[in-house]
Image (tube, rainbow, N blue to C red):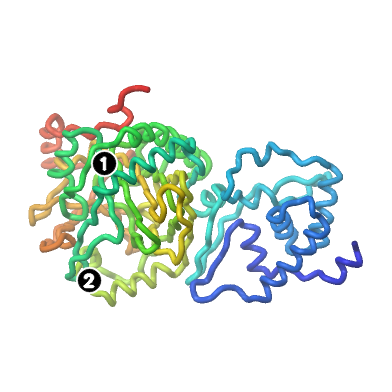
Amino acid sequence: MEAFLARKKPRLSQPQARSDRAGVTPSNESEGASADTEESTDIKLAMLISLHPEIKQDELLDILASCDGSVEEASSLLSTKNSAAPTRSKKRTAGVSLGIQSSLSSHILTKSEDGSLRPMKEIKPLTTKKGQTIHLYSPEDVAANTPCTIIHNFLPPEEANTLLKELLDESEHFSRYEFQLFNRTVQSPHTACVYVSTPEEYQQQTKEYTYGGTYRANVRQATPQLRSTSRKVQQAVNEEIQNRIKNVYPDGKKLKFQSPKPWRPNAAFVNCYDGPTESVGYHADELTYLGPHPVIGSLSLGVEREFRVRRIIPRDEDEDQSSSSSPRKDAKSAKKSTAHADAQGQISIHLPHNSLLVMHAEMQEEWKHAITPAQTISPHPISGNRRINITYRWYRESLNPRFTPRCRCGTHAILRCSQRKQESRGRYMWMCYAGFAPGKQGCSFFQWAEFDDDGNPVWDQKQEQKHVESVDAAPGLAHFSASQSSQ
């Protein structure tokens, strides 16, 4: 064996080794990696396969990466492992579903001080570069590199399929919403619908709640399966919130402005992406009714698509807050903004059928997300080329539209977080958004928004009096789980 290894001992290049160790696939949008590097890895993998035919190819690749591309070291580790444990454990793979890549960190082996082998558990966050996309698949890598956590195979298979079929039927009633951009009326590149619990809430949604400066007519009552699933989503999201607070946030405490109350969804946006070209551009979700540092539970069904995220980088330019957010901003300025935002690259999270993605409290203020067009997709046996996505949301009672400020033009102001200027980054503001509604002109309304540590609005005396008078007349939305019969 030593003579065979001596003839071929090419090593992985540093970029390739790093990406393999991390369980990701970096891809430069301009062009891919060199053919020489890929061929070198293939040769080494073939050598390991010939030496250890009893071990799966993907595991051999993982161990090769952990040894920095050295076939000799990888083979030595494998020989040690096999002699110590001649029979392979079946328990380890019992809970892993076909097609879901587990984190490479669980496979990569390292030697302990006593000479025994153990998995390398630590996952170091990656640094993206301009023009680069890092692809993440495993829950460990998603949690380490983004403000999200993902749960694969969230629902029992039959339950997921039933929900998918139910919402595919519902999608016949979905529509594209319209908005104004650069003085042109455009439509969303996918269809969607808002779901609430009761007929009374339907009336509220169509006459009181606004989205992007307009009332949304396409509102429906939650379906039985949508309600049933909300209970499981609620439990899972609250568990992930507590894990995030304990393991990620400073001193194990919730973020400032994050609600200390249990997360309880009372509205859902259901989106349908019909085919690979349907998408949604980079954006942060509107905070008007969610409040600061909201958490969103997003369930994907049907065709797998890429969910891309990138950090929001503040600009150095001294721009006026109201003008920088104006819908009249010209296309050249918008293109410059996009180029600036891409300075640190982007991360792609792959969302297969029946996966729950939790967008944590820092997501909307510090990151933007998108579903980008795909060149090709793999059809789903039930939905064909369609992907259904449910984003469960908690509309805060303290941010009922009867409490929130109105612009001088008479429309509801929206709540946004200042992200562009370093000196005001992280502050919240009420702004006019009517200029984004087709056929409407916005005003220059602007007001800083104040919140207590738990994310409840702090109104001035005039607004506080209005709030007190409106409490009884402005019931909050019923939680999905509270409005359904117990099962």
In the rendered structure, the answer to whether residue 318 lies left or right of residue 146 reads: left
Quadrant position of the C terminus in the picture: top left
User: Where residue 377 sits in the image (x, y, percent)?
Assistant: 46, 60
- Total of numbered circles in the picture? 2
* Marked residue nearer the N-terminal end (1 or 2): 1
Q: Quadrant of residue 273?
A: bottom left
Q: Amino acid at mark 2?
A: Lys
Local crowd at mark 2 within 10 Å, few (<14), some, or many (≥20)? Answer: some
Residue at 14% over, 41% down? 402
| Residue 100 vs residue 282, the one in the foreground | 100
User: Where residue 243 sits in the image (x, y, percent)?
Assistant: 50, 38
Pointer 1 residue: 195
Q: Quadrant of residue 341?
A: bottom left
User: Where residue 398 sits in the image (x, y, percent)?
Assistant: 23, 37
Which label is found at residue 329?
A: 2
Q: Amino acid at mark 1?
A: Tyr
**Mark 2: which secondary structure?**
loop
Residue at 16% over, 48% down? 217
In the rendered structure, the answer to whether residue 373 lies left or right of residue 68 reads: left
Which label is found at residue 253?
A: none
User: Where residue 196 sits in the image (x, y, percent)?
Assistant: 25, 38
Contact check, label 1 and label 2, Cβ < 8 Å = no
| Residue 125 vs residue 41, the one in the foreground | 41
Residue at 44% over, 67% down? 375
Q: Nearer the viewer, mark 1 or mark 2?
A: 1
**Mark 1: which secondary structure?**
strand
Question: Disc 1 and disc 2: Cα gap in Å?
Answer: 33 Å
Residue 207 appears in view = yes
Q: Is residue 98 above or below residue 179?
A: above
